[in-house]
Image: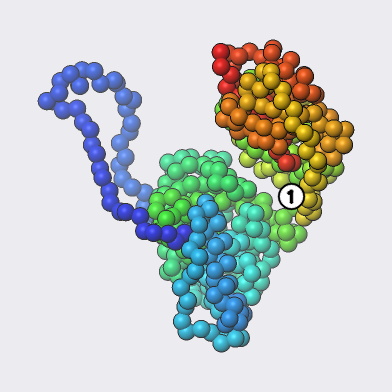
Amino acid sequence: MTLLRARTPQTGLTLIALACTLMLPACAQTAPARPTVSAVSGLPDFTTLVEQVGPAVVNIRTTQHAKADSEEAQQDAESRELFRRFFGVPAPRQLPRRAPQPDPEEEVQRGVGSGFIVSGDGYVLTNAHVVDGADEVLVRLTDKREFKARIIGVDKRSDVAVVKIDADKLPTVSFGDVSKLKVGEWVIAIGSPFSLDNSVTAGIVSAKARDTGELLPLIQTDVAINPGNSGGPLINLRGEVVGINSQIYSRSGGYMGISFAIPADEVQRVATQLRTHGRVIRSRIGVSIGEVTKDVAESLGLPKPTGALVRSAETDGPGAKAGIEGGDIILRFDDQVIEKWSDLPRFVTNTTPGSAHKLQLLRRGVVKELSVTVAEIAAEPTSAQAETPKPAPQDNRGLAFALGLKVSELSEADRSTLKLKTGVRIDAVDGAAARAGLREGDILLAVANSDVGSAKQLEVLLAHADRAKPLSVLFRREDLAQYAVIRLSK
């Protein structure tokens, strides 16, 4: 559960109805025919469903041993993490101090969440942010029995955690097929909002595979979710778990009609690895990627914005060894089409480290296929970018100058340091080039899908460019390659 605390938004509801009546015959005559929809006889009855699933939903409380003088700092750090998960809305600089202050060795309760039992011998699933960092986890069942739980594994990237209690013959839930989940389908949530155990709320699926910037695409619903619902199950009308309630969008700190759940298929995959290895093993190819915009797609001849733009490839990483370069647009990973750039890391992370996979990419207007051997995700060392001496500017008063560009040649030392075979340095920028987003210090790599080897070659490429169409330019800024589109005057 992620939580925002900002100023309370204005409330109110305005209903506007438009209708054609007998007073407006013209409206009735011109109204187009509409497909008939069968009338809804009534709302679903959730009572049997709750009786079936409710006993397997648990309340989770966490505590932590903390010193009194560190409590406020800890609360501040936790709150800022919650704000981060709520789409980056800034947190207040200070939080109100709670009173009374605990003794130096007193247990401080950190939070309340929810979970659900997936095996009769006591395995429970919940959110990672519910139990991460806790010294003690207490699980309370609907029959009021309470158990101390041990944390089996926590995966912050997916926000899934597995805990274990010592009990047997427990009620359990079953998982449903998320691929069959439909937008508009009824779902319910059971959890402990504000510590109110086994509270039931209902709504519909608002969207599937919602991209919120997280590693996993999320299920969006309008089910009422509040603090304490974190880790509880999202259930379809067949009594199957289709997701774990994880996040809400809010400006007030409470439910505002938008909530998100982690899809059940991803939950099962992560939970299996946590139970087997205690952690989740993921793969990477060592590239930094970005979005392919509509302008870039049009300038490169793509029918629509699709794929992932490679901004840089890690030196000696799997991608660089496979031949991936900055400026490439990766279109497919194996047989999976990359509709949006965030699809690529999701496809890659689900593979086995050391396995080989096919990539289809677009480079300078040419489709290429490569084979990449993925590696396991590990902590990556950061290295400072070596600074290169800046050559004296050259006033190239030609077509480049007309676009607002002043460029200079790269020395052999520059190319060696920057690991580039081609490119010219932008020493000044103005006009159309500045409007396209180019800056002083950028390295211009390609124009209209052709490499730029020198300032003279740049002039030749600009002379042959179709001035009736946007001009795509590939450039490097620090370690990242990206595209810009310069609008040429006719």
| Picture coordinates of residue 242, whole percent (x, y) | 54, 50
Quarter of the figure that contains the C terminus: top right
SS label for mark 1? loop
Residue that appears at 72% across and 22% down: 396
> Which residue is located at x 69 percent, y 55 percent?
272
Report x, y in % for residue 438: 64, 32
Query: In this rendering, is residue 257 above or below 120?
Result: above
In this picture, residue 410 sits left or right of residue 179:
right
| Residue occupied by mark 1 | 282
Query: Is residue 431 or residue 325 the one in the foreground?
Result: 431
Q: Up-down: is 48 above or below 411?
A: below
Answer above or below: position of 429 versus 134.
above
Looking at the image, what colour scheme do you see? rainbow
Question: Does the image show residue 146?
Answer: no
Note whether residue 438 is visible.
Answer: yes
Place of residue 451 in the rendered image (x, y in percent of width and height, measured from the top left): 77, 23
Residue at far left of view: 23
Along the line of sight, the residue nearer the viewer: 198 or 254: 254
Answer few, some or many: residues within 10 Å of disc 1's Cα (few below 14, many 20 plus, some between 14 and 19): some
From the viewer's side, name the closer residue of 399 and 445.
399
The residue under label 1 is which amino acid type? Answer: Arg
